[in-house]
Every structure is written in C-alpha cells, then in structure tokens.
Amino acid sequence: MKIAIGCDHGGIVLKPAVEEVLKAKNIEIEDLGCYSTDSVDYPDYALKVAEEVSQGKADLGIILCGTGIGISIAANKVKGIRAGVAHDLFTAEMTKRHNNANILAMGGRVVSPELAAQMTKIWLETEFEGGRHTNRVNKITAIEQKYFK
Ligand code: RB5
C-alpha cells in the first residue's frame, strides 16, 4: 500500500508521528511536502495529494494543516476524493467506517502528534461498513457527477 502525505506549515508538526505509524505498517510513503515551517498555501498540498489518490497513484492520502479544515475543503474539490476531517479517535474511525474517506485530514493546532498517530492507526485499521452507508456514499458520488464536468 502507498499513502501520499501533504501538509502546510500549520500541519507539519504532525508529520513525523504520522509517518512513524505508516513505517511501522510497512506502508510506502509519498511525501509531497511541505518540508519546513515556512508559510505556504494549503491548497497546493491538498491538490498534490488529492491528484495522487484520484489518479490511483496512491491508495490513500493524509493531509495536515492548522485545523484540517482548509486542506480538506481543497482536496474535496478533486473528483473522486472524500477527505474527512477528524479531531479524535471516534471521528477518525467514522471517516472510514461510514464515509469511506480516502483521505484523512487533521489539524496540527487541534490535535497532538501522539493523538494524530493513534487516529492514523485507527483510520487505517477500520474498514468501510458498507450496507446503508454504500447508498449514501454513492449519493455523494452522484452529486460529484452532476457538478464536476
Ligand atoms: C494557516 O495559517 C492555516 O490557515 C491553515 O493551516 C489551515 O488551518 C486552514 O484551514
């Protein structure tokens, strides 16, 4: 499995802890930046990760900004992307179990590196539940097909 990871200066604090989890699971990491705490624009990194996932070059993605909000909004503009922001273990699990999020977004000003690592782990280890949630996720795709030309 390969996971693309991207962040801005507000999220970079979480990257080492998240990467540690991926390495422990022998997951290939595609680190698309940023690489320092110099100020950058989160949509640039959202796009890099979202394109890798959307084009099937990465299986999943992890994106990090100050809150997880801006970078997820940007990633969700790319066709096929379901980026979910999580703030705790419950929301991290649910983004996969109910929403089948193919990108996990977290905020470096919201959660600690330790919590981000645990959230990454639970998100990776959770399966999409399917059932009634399949219909709902399909309806998200239908909205996408209506508005993405
Ligand atoms: C950058 O200061 C900050 O706005 C960004 O990291 C993120 O929180 C946006 O949603």
Image (cartoon, grey):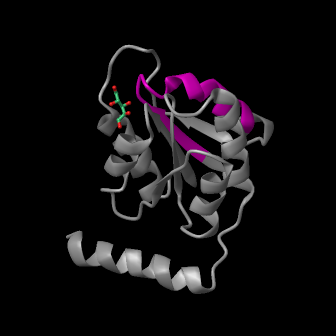
Foreground pick, 57 / 43: 43
Question: In the picture provided, is 37 more to the left or to the right than 58?
Answer: left
Q: Is residue 143 above or below residue 106?
A: below
Q: Residue at x 40, y 81 (%)?
A: 139
Q: Is residue 36 above or below residue 71?
A: above
Query: Quadrant location of ligand 1?
Result: top left
| Residue 55 seen by the camera | no
* Percent coordinates x, y for residue 88 in the rendering: 63, 46
Q: Residue at x 41, y 28 (%)?
A: 8
Q: Count the marks.
A: 0
Residue 18's quadrant in the figure? Answer: top right
Q: Is residue 34 above or below residue 52?
A: above
Farthest-out residue, right: 24
What range of the chain is rendered magenta?
3-21
Residue 62's quadrant in the figure? Answer: top right
Foreground pick, 42 / 28: 42
Question: In the picture provided, is 127 more to the left or to the right than 11?
Answer: right
Q: Residue at x 64, y 28 (%)?
A: 113
Question: In the picture provided, is 128 more to the left or to the right than 107?
Answer: right
| Residue 119 seen by the camera | yes
Q: Residue at x 58, y 86 (%)?
A: 132
* Percent coordinates x, y for residue 128 in the rendering: 65, 70
Is residue 91 in the magenta section? no
